[in-house]
Structure formats: structure tokens, C-alpha cells
Amino acid sequence: MDIKVELNGEIEEAEIVELYRANEWSSAEKPEQLLLALRNSHTLVTARVAGKLVGVGNAISDGHLVVYYPHMLVHPSSHGNGIGRKMMEAMQSVYNGFHQQMLTADGEAIEFYKALGFERAGKTEPMWVYAGAEH
């Protein structure tokens, strides 16, 4: 499988919505805002196989000390092929060595991120004001 990972590449609404719906993320129901959010991120990472978008992630950062990874999705049919790992490696080419790298993980994603070196932050508790049902 030839996986092409790119930083700050082009994305189209239809392919983004399809990927978010495949992962059952509620932000797919707000395509205009979703596309603006992704395109205006500090860094955007995409993964494609034969030109088809199979993964996307973004980073919000001050550019010096702190980075937050709000979205990292791989199409369910492509799970287990190393795509998420390659996307995070690309993000690390930008953010490696930052004082603080943060994300929120749930479900199966927890073990994935632990394998990449992330750990629970002390006694922190995830908190949010959220307009969606899940993701």
C-alpha cells in the first residue's frame, strides 16, 4: 500500500465529509465550519492512497511551546495499516521537542496514542462545553 502523507495539502469538502461520516464524527454535519477549521489550523496532515483521502489530522499551536491535536481520523476500512502512525510522524516533524503536546483520546485511540508515547496528564480530567453527541 503506497501511502502519501502530506503537510498542509489541499482538501475538498466532499472527501472530508465522507471521512468524518465514516468515523461517525458529528462535525460532518457542519461541513462549512469543519473545512474552515481544518484549513485554518496551524498544521494540517493528510494521508492518501491512490489519490483517495484515507486520513486527516490537524494541530492548533502557538508555534513555539504548545500544540493541541484536536482531530486525527483514519477511514475505518484503512485502520491497522500504519496510516495514523505516519500522520503523527509527520506532525512530529513540526512539533517534536515542543514543551507540551496535548490531545484527547477515547476508545481504541487511547492505546494507539500510548504506543506513540502519549500518557495521561497527571490527575487531569477531560472537560468540555460541547455541541455534539460524540466527536
Image: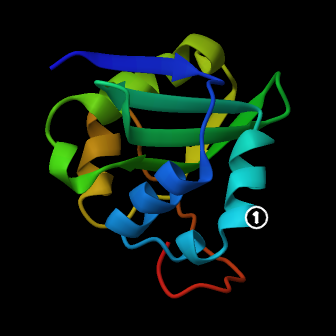
Three-letter amino acid code of the residue under disc 1: Gln
Asked if 21 appears above or below 128 in the picture, the reply is above
Question: Is residue 97 in view?
Answer: no
At x 59%, y 71%, the residue is 27
Residue density around tag 1, few if under 14, some if 14–19, many if 20 or more, within 10 Å:
few
On the rendered structure, is 58 left or right of 92? Answer: right
On the rendered structure, is 62 left or right of 70? Answer: right
Point out residue 16 in the picture as x, y percentages from the top left corner: 52, 52
Point out residue 102 in the picture as x, y percentages from the top left corner: 60, 45
Q: Secondary structure at mark 1?
A: helix
Q: Nearer the viewer, residue 121 or 116?
A: 116
**Disc 1 marks which residue?**
33
At x 76%, y 64%, the residue is 33
Point out residue 65 in the picture as x, y percentages from the top left corner: 78, 27
Q: Nearer the viewer, residue 38 or 70?
A: 38
Asked if 36 appears above or below 51 in the picture, the reply is below
Q: Residue furthest top?
A: 93
On the rendered structure, is 84 left or right of 31? Answer: left
